[in-house]
Structure formats: C-alpha cells, structure tokens
Amino acid sequence: MTDSNKSATLTVHGETYELPVYSPTTGPDVIDIRKLYSDAGVFTYDPGFTSTASCDSTITYIDGEKGELLHRGYPIDQLAGKSHFLEVCYLLLYGELPQAKDLEQFETTITRHTMLHEQMQYFYRGFRRDAHPMAIMVGVVGAMSAFYHDSTDVSDPHQREVASHRLIAKMPTIAAWAYKYHIGQPFVYPRNDLDYASNFLRMCFAVPAEEYEVNPILSRAMDRILTLHADHEQNASTSTVRLASSSGANPFACIAAGVACLWGPAHGGANQACLEMLEEIGSVDRIPEYIDRAKDKSDPFRLMGFGHRVYKNFDPRATVMKQSADEVLDLLGVENNPKLQVAKALEKQALEDPYFAEKKLFPNVDFYSGIILEAMGFPTSMFTPIFALSRTVGWVSQWKEMIADPQNKIGRPRQLYLGETTRDYVDIENR
Ligand code: SDX
C-alpha cells in the first residue's frame, strides 16, 4: 500500500487518536485500526463487513459505482472476449498474462492432473443418489486432504503450487462425477486431448453407449462462464477460505470451506434460486406480482440474481452473460426461450421501478447464467457446482497470496457483547 502522510483523527472517551491512512493504487483509502483496541480499548463494529478491508491484495479490483471488474488490471469484458479460462487462471495465479510457452506448459500441467485417485470413487458411493451435487462436492473436496498428503504442507512453496494445480485440475472431474452419480450414470474419465471446458462437458454428458462430440458453441460458452466467475475480490466464500487458511489448515480443507459458503442462496446458490424463481413466475404477465412481493418488507421473497453488496450501478459480468445468453440460445435454435423472455421482461420492469433504482439493485452475475446452463442441458442443481469449479482458481489465488504474506496471522474478530454479566450458578431446586 502506498504510504500517504494522511491520517484520521478519532476522539474516544475524551482522548484523541491519530490513525494512519493508506492509499491504494485505485479505490478508497483505508484507515489502519490495528492498534485501536490496544491504544483506546475499543473495537470497531461492522457486522457483514460493509466498511471493512480484511486484507490487502493485488489480484482483483471492483469499482461498484462504475461497474468495473479488473483481474490483475485487465477488464473482465476484455478477458471474456479475448482470453480463455486457463489463461485467466494463469493470470490470477501468477499476476501476468503468460508467454505462449508458459501457457502451453501450464495447460499441460493442469490437463495431466485432471484424474482423481481411483479410490475417491468410493466417497461418491456413500452418498444418497438424490444428494445435492454441492453436498457431494463439499465432502469430496475436503476428502482430497486424505489422499494428497504430499501437497498439504502450506509452509512449503512447492507443495502449495502442487495443491493449487491439483485443485484447479480436479474440480471439473469432481463436479462432473457428482452429477453422474446424481443421475445414476457411470463416471466418465477426463481426456487429455480436450481443452478444460470441453473435458468438463464431455465428463458430464458422454455415456459409454455412444461417442460424444463436444459442441464448440457450448464449449466456448462454458469457457466464458468459467472466466466470468473466476474471482471476485473478498466475497463471502473467498473470505471464508482466507479465514480458514489463517489457522494453517491444509488447502483442500480450506477450499472445501469455500465450497460450503458459496452454496448459500445469497451467494453462489443464487443462480439455481434465480432459475427456480423464473420457473415459478412462469409468464411475463405474472412479473408485477413478484416485483410487488420483492418490495414488500413483510414478504421474505427477493428477486434472485438481483442486487449486490458492491455493484451499485451494474455487474459487468451480467452484461457479458446476457450477450452470451442471446448468442448461445440463438445458435442452439432455442427460439423464444420462455425463461429468457421472462428474465428480460423482469429486468426491464424492475429497472423501471423506483424501488430498485433507489436501492441500486441491478442484475448480477447469477441472473442470466442459469438460462445458458439450462440450455446446455444442466439441471439447476449443477449451477452452483459449476460456479464452484470456476471460483476455485480465485480461492486458490487469494489463498496463495495470503499464505505468502509475512504479515499473515490467524483471523480472530471480536464482538459487541450484549449478554448477561457474571452471575452465580443456581441449583435446580432453587430455580
Ligand atoms: C454473488 O460478494 C460478491 O462478490 C458475490 C458474487 C461473487 O462473484 O462472489 O458477486 C456472487 O453472490 C452475487 C449475489 C447473488 N445473490 C443474489 O442474487 C440473491 C439476491 N440478492 C440479495 O440477497 C442481496 O442483494 C445481496 C445478498 C446480494 C446483497 O445484500 P446486501 O449488500 O447485504 O444488501 P441488503 O441485503 O442490505 O439489501 C439492501 C436493500 C435492502 O432493503 P432495506 O433493508 O434497505 O429496505 O435492498 C434490498 C434489501 O431488502 N434488496 C432487495 C434485493 N437485494 C437487496 N430487495 C429485493 N430483491 C433483492 N434481490
């Protein structure tokens, strides 16, 4: 952080304190409160971390007002249009776009780590067939620490590198096999002659009974979806991974914690919830009823795929996703997809409603992604696993950055205690 000669003055209980202020390369300044409790005997209070920077990072920058998302300085719309997912993985992990030879070596390394230890299949057989694929992913990703013992020592840079590659490479296999197990079809092994997105599609949709040709339209669309979900600053699941990692837990356990957090409908589970919402709305003429429900404080219903803690203008990923939805459905000949029509009409009507304008609620990355994934043949239960397999590179990149930071220490927030003061135990006969 660029040290500025700026400072913040705070007066607490009649005492005045000067707190250092640091300026980022871009974005808001931060006030360093690390010594506040030891100097002034007070905590700051910020449930949900709406005004708190938990770390410094060089990976991803988001400007919520401008609707800007940069990965190592490169705008997401340029990466989605000109790059591809494994190149974005390299960029997130190592900080620069790769030279051709480095990219080829990286892609070869990832490709050659896509298989799972053969015994890991037995974990799947322990789940009910109707288990949600995210329940399986949480379990199997955590179980990786029971297999890959040679890449669990976080103090060893080489083991950190191997764990990073294994997680990025194996997540599509884990997700695809969760889907295959869910539908009762045999597992399909990865192929080294296919690119990352094509391999994933083939592991999901191929069956032993016939050859499976990957549709290049779907493969390109899948690759773009993976690029759009790769990383997103200090979101809930990334913060979960960072906090879990701060105790020194092994990388597989920490990424499993990220998978668990992402599952929530307020976070990565919103893509599944959004498509289920569009299905429930069913037709354009029912949209006003649902917009009224979303505005009704007494109704817990929210427009899924709408709103964002940071974006208060538009989510640049949603813009790209909407274009991709139009292209993919048109190319697939899915004319007048009813859910796409409802989604477009819902977006239009919501954005014309003062409530959403006042609260700065716009479609987020989850609003259109489900429509594309459904058109590809995925059930809604696979939407969040696909988000998780993409976000793995973001979690891993942020984890590597944190572990390598000499300032890294265990995360241990405090609280505003509103419970009972000390009182003596009362025997049951006297209560
Ligand atoms: C992701 O953080 C990230 O970067 C996440 C993510 C990533 O890539 O990692 O971008 C991925 O998680 C996207 C968000 C997916 N979630 C949804 O689409 C679920 C629906 N959205 C909301 O639940 C909500 O908008 C959040 C959780 C996304 C953001 O919640 P905040 O920032 O805590 O905002 P809030 O809940 O305090 O809402 C502010 C106001 C409230 O009204 P008031 O109490 O001020 O009167 O806006 C209202 C809310 O009731 N509101 C909505 C709404 N979202 C917020 N009202 C109706 N529908 C909605 N979707």
Image: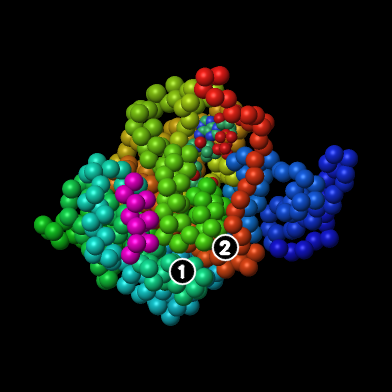
Residue 64, position as x, y percentages in the image: 61, 47
Disc 2 to disc 1, C-alpha distance: 15 Å
Amino acid under disc 1: Asp
Query: Disc 2 designates what residue?
Result: 402
Residue 356 visible, this orientation: no
> Callout 2: 10 Å neighbours few (<14), some, many (20+)?
many
Amino acid under disc 2: Met
User: Which mark, by number, is residue 303?
Assistant: none
Residue 254, position as x, y percentages in the image: 46, 56
Name the foreground residue: 6 vs 357: 6
Magenta region includes residue 270: no
Callout 1 secondary element: loop
**Quick one: which residue is furthest to the left in this view?**
209
- Mark 1 Cβ inside 8 Å of ligand 1: no
The residues colored magenta run 135-147
The residue that appears at 64% across and 59% down in the rendered structure is: 56
Magenta region includes residue 137: yes
Q: Is residue 106 left or right of residue 174?
A: right
The residue that appears at 68% across and 40% down in the rendered structure is: 45
The residue that appears at 76% across and 51% down in the rendered structure is: 38
User: Which mark, by number, is residue 153?
Assistant: 1
The residue that appears at 44% across and 41% down in the rendered structure is: 264
